[in-house]
Amino acid sequence: MKNIALLGSTGSIGTQTLDVVRHQRDRFRIVGLSAGNNAELVIEQAKEFKPALVSVATKELAEQVRLYMPEGTRVTYGEEGLIEVAAGTDADTVVTAIIGSRGLPATLAAIHAGKTIGLANKETLVTAGHIVMQRAKERGVAVLPIDSEHSAIYQCLNGERRSDVLGITLTASGGSFRDRTREQLAGVTVEDALKHPNWSMGAKITIDSATMVNKGLEVIEAKWLFDLDYDQVNVLIHPESIIHSYVEFTDNSIIAQLGMPDMRVPIQYALTYPERLPTPTERLSLAQIGKLQFREMDYERFPCLRLAFQCGRLGQSAPTVYNAANEVAVARFLNREISFLDIERVLETVVERHDVCDVHDLRTITEVDEWARGLAATV
Ligand SMILES: NC(=O)C1=CN([C@@H]2O[C@H](COP(=O)(O)OP(=O)(O)OC[C@H]3O[C@@H](n4cnc5c(N)ncnc54)[C@H](OP(=O)(O)O)[C@@H]3O)[C@@H](O)[C@H]2O)C=CC1
Ligand SMILES: CC(=O)[C@@H](O)[C@H](O)COP(=O)(O)O
Ligand SMILES: [Mn+2]
């Protein structure tokens, strides 16, 4: 039996993780759940999975939620509550399905407590990849990717010698506006931007996919997860999201991982690795799909991806700033304060005004993150 603590249980990855657990009840037990503000759903989840600990965003919410908990479930809240779910239960694995760089302290706490990490929260690695991976290494903790592209790369690298790897290619669907020109992006609505062609995901990542920031974050995530140089990371537009990513080797062989776009496959793989178990997902029939398409990435059309490579190569505080500015810009777009194209303007302005500095500890990361958020909220 594997014990799991789940950060972000009420979100897209969180609910799909619980679905995986639901189908493998004799394998997995939920011991901790952390949610934000969705009290109704976390109550339902607690009744079904009976974890020892539940955390919600605020004290007021915790007081409400507590009234409906099954026997034996304790309720906590806020940043400390999140950290307690990450590090204070008898979980073997912590799934980080919370959104944004606010997941960083809890992820570090889980690593410190020796938990295996099932990592969906890519912003954590973009913000502080060097710290997270270093601490995981020191503690002997595995960081298993859940992000579909990184799960694909992890699977393709299985049993291979790292010295034989030429590079990796992350596939990108192109997002909601893949077939529009830049001119056609002026005036697009939040509703249009939230229509991802292949995946059903939370709002923030769906917008990131449309701006290609998601792929930018994934490039930096891949750098840290697989210890690559940025020259070894490529991006290719693949509209169908069937090839989830691939690795190219020195003998010119390519190993790719394919499947229908369903996050329950990579989520379960991170939970069962190195084993594979059946999933309740659709099987891929290439005959039925017929053909797969590919297009060269256009860095003029998607400047946020170019900026991500620039920030990644600059290193130090640049990726932290890129991520924080984006989180704020996306929230402003979703609040209808700024237009879709303003997201990249905010990102470019904040990155441009930042003097890159060394970020060797969590305190400096937090300072830089807050500086970028402050500026991104006003430009
Ligand atoms: N969705 C997907 O298919 C994929 C997602 N990812 C990554 O996984 C992560 C989660 O994405 P996704 O599931 O789409 O996001 P969602 O927006 O669907 O879910 C976010 C989760 O975080 C919780 N949360 C938000 N604010 C707080 C807070 N202040 N305190 C505690 N919890 C909070 C939410 O709680 P509540 O709703 O209760 O407020 C919710 O449970 C992201 O980093 C994303 O990039 C990666 C690959 C694919
Ligand atoms: C499912 C998943 O991993 C997402 O990160 C997905 O990759 C988003 O699709 P894009 O390829 O459009 O960014
Ligand atoms: Mn992805």
Image (tube, helix red, strand yellow):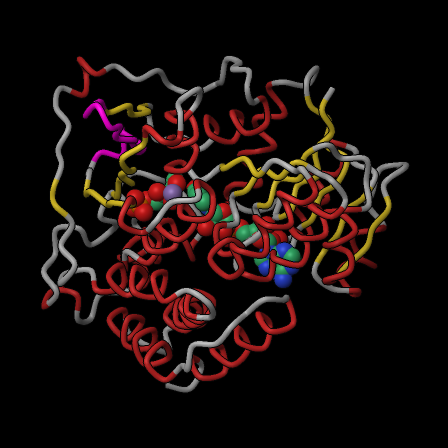
Q: Is residue 216 visible?
A: yes
**Residue 258: x %, y % from top left:** 31, 24
- The residue that appears at 26% across and 59% down in the rendered structure is 305
Q: Is residue 48 visible?
A: no
Is 33 above or below relative to 379?
above
Please say whether residue 248 is one of the residues in the magenta stretch: yes
- The residue that appears at 79% across and 51% down in the rendered structure is 84
Furthest residue in direction front, as rendered = 163
Please tell me which residue lies in front, 247 or 179.
247
Answer with left or right where residue 154 lies relative to residue 189.
right
- The residue that appears at 33% across and 23% down in the rendered structure is 259
Furthest residue in direction right, as rendered = 72
Task: Quadrant for residue 301, please give it.
Answer: bottom left
- The residue that appears at 50% across and 83% down in the rendered structure is 374
Please tell me which residue lies in front, 199 or 299.
299
Is the N terminus in the top left, top right, bottom left or bottom right quadrant? top right
Answer with left or right where residue 339 lies relative to residue 296.
right
Please say whether residue 324 is one of the residues in the magenta stretch: no
Answer with left or right where residue 346 lies relative to residue 85.
left
Which residues make up the magenta segment? Answer: 240-253
**Residue 15: x %, y % from top left:** 56, 38
**Residue 125: x %, y % from top left:** 50, 53
Task: Quadrant for residue 283, please give it.
Answer: top left
Is 148 above or below relative to 309?
above
**Residue 105: x %, y % from top left:** 67, 59
Q: How many badges with numbers are in the image?
A: 0
